[in-house]
Image (cartoon, grey):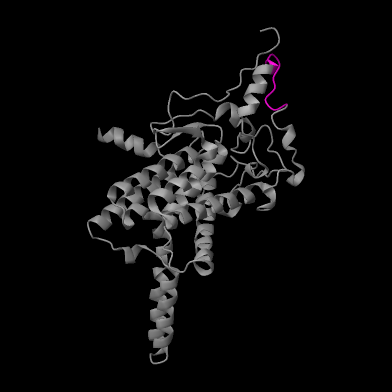
Amino acid sequence: MAQTLADRVKAIPPVTRFFTITSVLVCLAIRLEFLSFDQLLWRWHYEIQDYRRIYEYSKYASRSQTAKNVFFQFIQSYRIFTSFLVPSGMLGSGPLDAVLDIYFFYTFANHLESSQGKFKGNFADCLWFTLVTGTSIVFASLVYNVVFDMRHMEVYHSMMSTCIIYVWSRYSKNSMINFFGVIPLKAYYLPLFNMGARLIISGFDSSVDVFVGILCGYLYQCIQSDTMPFYNLYPTSYGQNPSAHGANNGRRVGSSGSREENISNDWIEDSIFDKGYLKAPLWFYNLLGYPSNNSVRVTAFTRAPHHSRTASASAPMKKETNEGETSGFSWFPNEEKVVFQGKGRRLGD
């Protein structure tokens, strides 16, 4: 049993495994009162207040004492990172909600990072995605606090989870899932349903966290595709022709016109910002000691070499190979493989 569990843990992609295990350990440490929220959560307005107190104290203290206070205060910036490890359930709703938060995070992060997901098991690129989106989450929540609501207590774990769900839903937009195991819908609509559910169940503040996560996931898509945020939402931006979508895509010799027409009516095409693949910079690969020849940087306006075995090269084929994947999680039912898998035939068959 122990060996089987160890094998299962080792099979989890590294970034997902790290966040899952550390989140569980943090929750246990909080419940056992080994750690407090003050030691784990970072709040920028509290940080400013602490530096103000140090400044006021410096008027009467020696330079060495002031430098020591600044140094110890700076060290506590580690809480920016540990804030991403505390699920929203630990902040009031209860341990069961915390377990569900961790499980949802694990499920979608695992799908995104796995060999069948967006990053095709590329550790460096997935970690770079985490750093880019995590940084944008911190800044976006800071802007919201300053501009709209200073009292809002952001939950970075919830924001990151929503960001991952959004990016997954854009990559697997035609997959059929069951929302909370009850409502069948395409993955494309999952972020919207998730925001509505959070608004109803947990209130406005929780839905704000969902919105920030979606926004940061969208901004990552803009960087990946090398397109302008918000402008790329217009149907005719960058010369897109929405009327042409579905007309010829996926048409193969031997397929019937009526079947192709039925499929295209239900199929959701990629938007311009869904295209491309963001590869981690070379210095980041060198820092990790990870091979850099297994992925290629692609934008919405460039195409990966046909011989490359990259995550980006697989993007145009995801309609045929990626959809309908399942897991043990009830949102991915085994029986609902209803999306088009590609049934073209060769001449003479």
Within the image, what quadrant is residue 256 found in? top right
Camera-side residue: 110 or 44? 44
Q: Residue at x 60, y 37 (%)?
A: 310
For the N terminus, which image quadrant? top left
User: What range of the chain is rendered magenta?
Assistant: 248-257
Residue 197 falls inside the magenta stretch: no
Q: For the image shown, how many numbered marks are present on the structure?
A: 0
State the residue lying farthest toward the top: 348
Q: Nearer the viewer, residue 140 or 51?
A: 140
Q: Is residue 195 above or below residue 81?
A: above
In the rendering, at what x and y percent does residue 258 appear? 67, 17
Label the magenta part by its dominant secondary structure. loop
Q: Quadrant of the C terminus?
A: top right
Is 78 positioned to the left or the right of 212 in the image?
A: left
Of all residues, the one furthest to the right in this rendering is 239
Is 309 left or right of 207, judged from the image as shown?
right
Is residue 149 depicted above or below 192 in this figure? below
Residue at x 45% of width, y 29% of height? 326
Closer to the camera in the image, 151 or 167: 151
Residue 127 location in percent, x, y? 50, 49
Q: Residue furthest front?
A: 200
The residue at the far bottom in this view is: 60
Q: Is residue 87 visible?
A: no
- Residue 186: x and y in percent read 52, 34
Expressed as whole percent of the image width and height from the top left, the position of residue 347 reads 71, 10
